[in-house]
Amino acid sequence: MNKKIIIILVAVVMIFAVVCGVYWFVKKNYQNYPTPTLILTDDTNSTPEGVEAIVNANNQFAFDLYSEYKSEKGNIFFSPYSISTALAMTYEGARGKTAEEMQAVLHIPEDAKIRRPNFAKIHNQINKANEKYELFTANALWAQENYQFLDEYFQTIEKYYGGKVTNLDFVEEREREKSRLIINNWTEKQTNNKIKDIIPKGVFDNLTRLVLTNAIYFKGVWDVQFDKKDTKKENFKTISGQTVKIPMMKLTDSGEEFNYADINGVKILELSYEGEDLSMLLVLPEENNLKNLENSISVEKLSEWRSRMIKQEVDIYLPRFKFETKYFMGETLKKIGMPTAFSPMNADFSGMTGKSDLYIGKVIHQAFVEVNEEGTEAAAATAVVMESWGLSVTPVFRADHPFIFIIQQKETGNILFMGRVSNPNE
């Protein structure tokens, strides 16, 4: 056989082997976690009043969080819905003082008959198919294998929040990284690859027992789009007073009408997305008056502004922007009223396991937004990491690499022999 042909055949076999190897790895490690398919939840007993209660709770929580982050430098962007949903799933397992604090911070109804079906209703509304835009949300639970959770808790989360549980291994160090990658991969898929690596290395340890995740994704085009050729570099005065050049989109003399109001120097503009179900509300204070706006904005103020907007022609100049944010929210959530949930010795999540052995270790939120001439793309994900302060999971000792060994007198600890195994076959 020709030498060149042999080389080609060998190369083909090697490529085939690599492809098979990659396929086997992906199938082995990722076949068991939930796919991006949309899961309907049980909203049988929801009511318009119940939905309004959840919406009001979410909006109040949004302004509470904004108040905490407004003093930080730079851009702010987060999904209050994603955070409140992940924490609401966590709240379902909280009891006693832990539950009282979480309920007060989230503002959600204490009555499960109101809370659960109406969270479910909003979940289904978000996931309602629409040809004009993309909008969906997903929840998932990731539980330490062989750890005893209450079936009732998992059933509640799946029924009302659409969060199916997948067993992973956080205890064994070798498997821990695989578990992290599986959760990150799920989050990435749910957000159209916009939220990557929500769980950084080092977050999980051998006390991690449960991770609750929410992801939300949106992509929509403006009902009235900006023309790219009209976008020009213009000045933008930053919060620090510095002037920078930014791409400014322009929509003037369009003949279109937009919901708009100018109330006490605050200009409010609503830009609708195709489908008319969703819109962006822009709130612009007078120059150098942002702090006053941030100190006064509230759920009530927002409701007032919305009621006073009228349709009219508006010349619009809007920056094109794109950025990402990431928040480790533990300290913020403690500050606004739920410290007990983060306390190893005091937290009570017995609704998850039947024992007071879990507490919230971390709450991580990551978000992405891009606004351009065509429309908007936004995504966010939240992960609540539950830790155990007990040692109820059997640890794994796998001596599959070099180790030291000692033969000692048990009572005194006197070393009689000491050695190292580098290669058991030698």
Image (cartoon, rainbow, N blue to C red):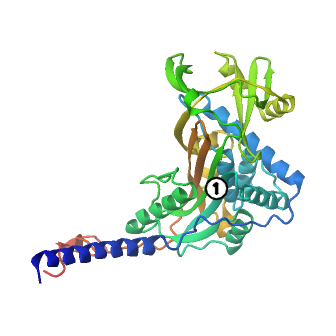
Using residue 180 as the reference point, say whether residue 96 is left or right of it: right
What residue type is disc 1 on? Ala
Q: Residue furthest bottom?
A: 1
Residue nearest the observer in this picture, 376 or 194: 376
Q: Is residue 3 above or below residue 321?
A: below
Quadrant including the N terminus: bottom left
Question: Where the C terminus falls, by quadrant?
Answer: bottom left
Q: Quadrant of residue 28?
A: bottom left
Q: Quadrant of residue 424?
A: bottom left
For label 1, count other residues whose C-alpha is less than 10 Å away and answer few (under 14), some (14-19) or many (20+): many
Residue 227, position as x, y percentages in the image: 60, 32
Could you tell me which secondary element the residue under label 1 belongs to?
A: loop
Q: In percent of the image, x 79 and y 27: which residue is there?
A: 260
Q: Kindly tell me whether residue 144 is visible in this rendering.
A: no
Viewer-closest of 324 and 200:
324
Look at mark 1 in the image and give the residue it sits on. Answer: 347
| Residue at 83% across, 49% down | 53
**Image quadrant in which you'd find residue 190:** bottom right
